[in-house]
């Protein structure tokens, strides 16, 4: 598996599939590139998809260093440099959407178009998931905690017909220090002041029944990023991109195609 080397020497594993203009897919917190396994083929026909294993996950190095969404964004730049890709479309979901915000705000010339899914700006301007959700995820019984996460990601109807595998529940190979680092990175994210500086055409996507990252965050993001477009997927939970792929993936591709024509 190829690796890029970040500015601090950490090796970042990446994966490339398909042909066409590059589309970077950024996964959620404490997940590696397998987060996208259920939908990656949706983009392969017209895009060259680029995924990464965040530092601390998968085949990337797992340093005992501070983790942050800004550092993850810098790692994406290192991967783009290794691939000799000057500009790419970027689709980030959950914490990956936070990383994508940093990438688009701090490295604007590298992002042609931006899609932010089931994410938030972070900080005091974001809508918190609430105590009940947090308690359900911190149950001492790991089986119960995993089931609670499953039910936040997917609807019961979808789970009934898709029992296994589930690629969005975290990288079980992560060491404890890296898992804590990812949690700190996501919790510390606050891009509110930087969002108005995003110049890439932006689509904000969210499921209306998302409790893990409340849907109220979506219009806040869309209002903060100049000229952005908001699309809500009725009845979807946090993993809208997988459960509602027949709707979500075409929305993303249509948006990216439209930005080609308008620029």
Image (cartoon, rainbow, N blue to C red):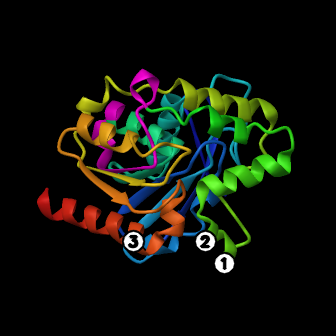
The image shows residue 164, relative to residue 189, as above or below, that is: below
| Farthest front residue in view | 132
Whether residue 10 is visible, yes or no, is no
The one of 77 and 38 positioned closer to us in this rendering: 38
Q: Which residue is mark 3?
A: 247
Gap in Å between the C-alphas at discs 2 and 3?
Answer: 15 Å
Based on the picture, tell me whether residue 143 belongs to the magenta stretch: no
Give the vertical position of 77 relative to 169 (above or below). above
User: Is residue 41 at least partly visible in the picture?
Assistant: yes
The x, y position of residue 133, in whole percent, is: 63, 40
Look at mark 2 in the image and give the residue it sits on. Answer: 158
Say which element carries label 1.
helix
Q: Residues within 10 Å of mark 1 (few under 14, many from 20)?
A: few
Relative side of 85 to 132, left or right: left
Element class at badge 3: helix
Give the extent of the magenta segment.
Answer: 105-126
């Amino acid at each position: 598996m190829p690796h890029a080397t970040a500015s601090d020497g950490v090796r970042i594993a990446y994966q490339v599939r398909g042909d066409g203009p590059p589309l970077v897919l950024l996964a959620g917190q404490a997940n590696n590139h397998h987060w996208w396994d259920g939908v990656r083929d949706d983009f392969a026909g017209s895009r060259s998809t680029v995924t990464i294993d965040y530092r601390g996950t998968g085949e990337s190095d797992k340093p005992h260093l501070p983790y942050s969404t800004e550092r993850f964004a810098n790692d994406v730049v290192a991967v783009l440099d290794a691939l000799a890709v000057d500009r790419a479309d970027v689709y980030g979901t959950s914490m990956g959407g936070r990383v994508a915000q940093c990438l688009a705000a701090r490295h604007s010339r590298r992002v042609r178009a931006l899609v932010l899914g089931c994410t938030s700006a972070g900080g005091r301007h974001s809508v918190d998931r609430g105590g009940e959700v947090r308690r359900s995820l911190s149950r001492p019984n790991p089986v119960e905690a995993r089931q609670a996460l499953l039910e936040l990601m997917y609807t019961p109807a979808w789970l009934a017909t898709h029992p296994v595998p589930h690629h969005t529940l975290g990288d079980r190979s992560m060491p404890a220090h890296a898992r804590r680092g990812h949690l700190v990175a996501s919790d510390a994210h606050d891009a509110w002041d930087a969002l108005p500086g995003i110049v890439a055409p932006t689509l904000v996507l969210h499921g209306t029944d998302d409790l893990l990252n409340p849907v109220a965050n979506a219009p806040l993001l869309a209002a903060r990023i100049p000229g952005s477009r908001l699309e809500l997927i009725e009845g979807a939970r946090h993993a809208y991109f997988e459960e509602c792929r027949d709707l979500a993936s075409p929305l993303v591709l249509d948006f990216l195609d439209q930005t080609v024509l308008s620029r």
